[in-house]
Image (cartoon, rainbow, N blue to C red):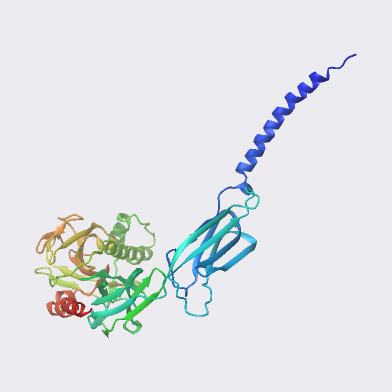
């Protein structure tokens, strides 16, 4: 009996080929889609990728889809190469934040630039030894701090009040410059008159107690991380705070507080005290944050030489219903449930009285603003603004320019109010300050316009 081995081999071959094909596809799929064979190289991010002061460590972020197993950072100049940091990780990680110090030099380093080479490898099996990224950065060496000098300023500032500062800040690699007040409030500087000179109106927030005042400084930081400061000389005076106790009727919470919260799409608590606190504290904080953001977003950035502002005027025929800087304590059923500062002047005359504007400017906000109701904010330049709250009708739109004497709105009862009136406030980079200063022509002259004029003379004399 004859056996046909050829037929068997043919049948076996036909069987093996599909099996091998399936195995091949499976292997390709396994290699292509299994994380251990991922093909994405590590990502390297250098925070200060243009300049270095050789004092502060460089911050380097390494990240990868799998895990980083090793890295090396090399300092390269015309004298050679120095390894700043090199490590094989016993426990590989997805993300690493390195703080790499400069090499130690026997004498003061005089080089102007270097190359920084950063290498990172992951634990992928795609290339057997892992994916590697190699990045080289050209780094300028800058060990000189910016020049920071106060040219002139309003010598006096009261709690809740304002002051003007003119400063010189110069650096080839300047990154940022600003004024700090008590290391908490930051005021942006605006280019003034000539290159390297800046000006800003600053504010002492009424909520910061007199005894907590520390200092105000001009701060400059360059791209290498060098920082310099200049103290602003100020004589300080306190503000006579008036405390007032207010009983809140349940009907006010049921109607006004509820309505304000609903119009701002806020949750309305069932408990009356919680509902009032939600409106008076939490929503108030959000509204104040909106005022500040709008003011800062529209802060001028171009160089200016002149700034003119007229004393703001009281609403004609009105009486002051509430003053600036009142500290209010709110009671419900003889129990204090909250407190807040009143940050403007409330003027009341007749219902829906016309509101003419004292100073020209640009309308930067017109909307319903919680406790402020229908509010308008006008930018007058140099970070100075004015706010008109609780209005009924508005006759302007955002982006329009308004001129002195123009009717912009009528008084009303929108927002968290009991009766028809205008809440008028003066803003310094979004912070409500004492309007009485800005209603005083002598104060404006001696604290603002004279300072700018004198500063120009000093700058012209400064080589």
Taking depth in this image into account, of 455 and 234 the one nearest to the observer is 455
Q: Which residue is drawn at 14% across and 70% down?
A: 309
| In the image, farthest residue toward the right | 1
Q: In which quarter of the image is the N terminus?
A: top right
Does 421 sit above or below residue 1? below
Taking depth in this image into account, of 350 and 112 the one nearest to the observer is 112
Does residue 298 appear anywhere in the picture? yes
- Tally the marks: 0
Does 197 sit left or right of 60 as displayed? left
Q: Which quadrant of the figure has residue 9?
A: top right
**Residue 312 rendering spot, x and y as whole percentages:** 14, 71
**Residue 441 rendering spot, x and y as whole percentages:** 12, 77
Q: In which quarter of the image is the C terminus?
A: bottom left
Taking depth in this image into account, of 22 and 1 the one nearest to the observer is 1
| In the image, farthest residue toward the front | 78
Does 328 sit above or below residue 366? below
Q: Which quadrant of the figure has residue 299?
A: bottom left
Q: Residue at x 12, y 69 (%)?
A: 318
Q: Which quadrant of the figure has residue 167?
A: bottom left
Does 241 sit left or right of 21 as displayed? left
Q: Residue at x 32, y 55 (%)?
A: 262
Does residue 332 appear anywhere in the picture? no
Q: Residue at x 12, y 67 (%)?
A: 358
Taking depth in this image into account, of 110 and 428 the one nearest to the observer is 110
Does 420 sit left or right of 47 as displayed? left
**Residue 81 rendering spot, x and y as whole percentages:** 55, 67
| In the image, farthest residue toward the top | 1
């Amino acid at each position: 009996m004859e056996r046909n081995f050829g037929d068997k081999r043919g049948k076996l071959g036909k069987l093996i080929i599909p099996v091998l094909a399936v195995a091949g596809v499976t292997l390709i799929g396994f290699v292509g889609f299994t994380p251990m064979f991922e093909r994405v190289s590590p990502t390297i991010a250098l925070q200060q990728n243009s300049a270095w002061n050789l004092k502060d460590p460089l911050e380097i972020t390494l990240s990868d889809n799998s895990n980083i197993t090793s890295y090396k950072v090399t300092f390269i100049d015309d004298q050679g190469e120095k390894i700043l940091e090199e490590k094989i990780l016993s426990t590989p990680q997805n993300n690493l934040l390195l703080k790499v110090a400069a090499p130690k030099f026997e004498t003061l380093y005089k080089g102007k630039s270097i190359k920084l080479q950063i290498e990172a490898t992951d634990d992928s099996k795609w290339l057997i030894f892992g994916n590697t990224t190699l990045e080289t950065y050209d780094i300028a060496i800058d060990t000189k701090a910016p020049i920071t000098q106060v040219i002139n300023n309003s010598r006096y500032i009261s709690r809740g009040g304002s002051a003007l500062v003119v400063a010189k800040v110069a650096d080839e690699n300047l990154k940022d410059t600003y004024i700090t007040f008590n290391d908490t409030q930051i005021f942006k500087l605006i280019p003034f008159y000539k290159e390297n000179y800046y000006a800003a109106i600053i504010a002492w927030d009424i909520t910061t107690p007199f005894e907590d005042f520390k200092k105000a400084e001009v701060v400059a930081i360059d791209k290498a991380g060098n920082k310099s400061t200049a103290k602003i000389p100020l004589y300080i005076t306190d503000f006579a705070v008036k405390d007032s106790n207010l009983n809140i009727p349940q009907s006010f919470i049921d109607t006004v507080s509820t309505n304000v919260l609903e119009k701002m799409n806020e949750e309305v608590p069932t408990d009356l005290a919680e509902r009032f606190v939600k409106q008076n504290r939490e929503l108030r904080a959000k509204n104040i944050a909106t005022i500040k953001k709008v003011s800062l977003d529209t802060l001028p950035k171009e160089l200016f030489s002149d700034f003119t502002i007229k004393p703001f005027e009281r609403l004609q025929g009105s009486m002051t219903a509430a003053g600036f800087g009142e500290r209010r304590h709110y009671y419900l059923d003889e129990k204090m449930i909250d407190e807040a500062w009143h940050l403007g002047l409330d003027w009341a005359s007749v219902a829906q009285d016309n509101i003419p504007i004292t100073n020209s400017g640009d309308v930067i906000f017109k909307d319903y603003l919680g406790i402020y109701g229908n509010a308008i904010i006008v930018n007058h330049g140099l970070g100075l603004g004015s706010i008109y709250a609780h209005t009924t009708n508005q006759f302007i739109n955002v982006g329009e320019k308004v001129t002195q004497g123009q009717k912009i709105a009528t008084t009303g009862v929108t927002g968290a109010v009991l009766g028809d009136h205008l809440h008028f406030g003066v803003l310094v980079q979004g912070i409500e300050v004492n309007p009485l200063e800005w209603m005083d022509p002598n104060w404006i002259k001696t604290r603002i316009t004279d300072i700018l004029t004198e500063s120009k003379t000093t700058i012209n004399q400064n080589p």
